[in-house]
Image: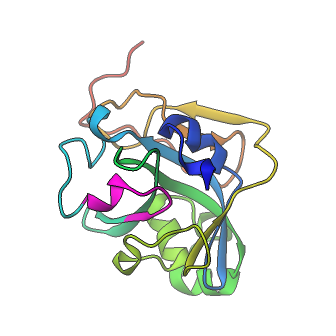
Amino acid sequence: MDLLDGPVDRVAPTLLGGLLRHGEVVVRLTEVEAYGGASDPASHAFRGRTARTAVMFGPPGRLYVYFSYGMHWAVNIVCGPDGAASGLLLRAGEVVEGLDVARSRRGRASDRDLARGPGRLTQALGITADHQGTSVLGDGPVTLTPDPQPAARVSRGPRVGVSAEADRPWRFWLTDDRYVSAYKRSPRAPAAPT
C-alpha cells in the first residue's frame, strides 16, 4: 500500500477516518501521532535497532506493539521506506462495529471512551503483544482500510506525554471530533514555548 510508504508526518493525517479491524471490532481512527525513528529522540527506535524495535524498521504496514507505562498495550503502524523505523501511534478512535465486544473488553467505559486513548483503543480491539509484526495490509487478523475521502479538517499539535521533542507538531486529529483524546503534556518535558 503506497499510502504507508511516505514520510511519517505526511502519512499520519491520511490515516484519519480510516478503519482498523480486528475480528468483530472496527475502529474509525480519529487521532494519530508520528514518530520518526533515528531523527526523532521521542521514538523508541531513536537509538537504533533492538530486539524490541526491530519491527519498526520495516516493511511498512506492520504493527509495533509495546507495553506502555506498565499498564496497557499501545500500537503503532510502521510506515516510511523499509529500514527507516518510522511509526504512527494510534491514539484514539470511535468503535463503529462490534460495540458489544468492545464494551465487554472495556468494562464500564462510555461508548465515547471505548477507544479514546492508545491503551483503550488496543483494549477495545483486543490487540496485544501477540500481534507484534502483524501486517495490516491484506487479509490478516488486523486490517486497515483507508478512508477514500481525505479528512476535510485535520488539526495538528504537540505530542502527548513525551519529554523529548514534546513540541514537535506531530499529533494529528480530526478537528472537533468528540472521539479524540485529551492533550496531556509530560511533566518531564521542558516548558512549552510562549
> Left or right of 70: which side holds 65?
right
| Residue 170 picture location, percent across and down | 48, 35
Instruction: Using the rendered view, name the quadrant where residue 22 is placed.
Output: bottom right
Tell me which residue sits at (48%, 44%) in the image: 33
Magenta segment, which residues? 53-64
Tell me which residue sits at (70%, 57%) in the image: 146
Instruction: Using the rendered view, name the quadrant where residue 109 is placed.
Output: bottom right
Tell me which residue sits at (27%, 49%) in the image: 44
| Residue 75 picture location, percent across and down | 43, 63
Magenta segment includes 52: no
> Extreme top residue here?
194
| Vertical relation: 41 (above or below) 145 | above
Magenta segment includes 57: yes
| Vertical relation: 167 (above or below) 6 | above
> Left or right of 36: which side holds 27?
right
| Residue 34 picture location, percent across and down | 46, 42
Quadrant where the N terminus sits is bottom right
| Residue 80 picture location, percent across and down | 47, 45
Q: Number of marks in the image?
A: 0
Tell me which residue sits at (62%, 41%) in the image: 13
Quadrant where the C terminus sits is top left
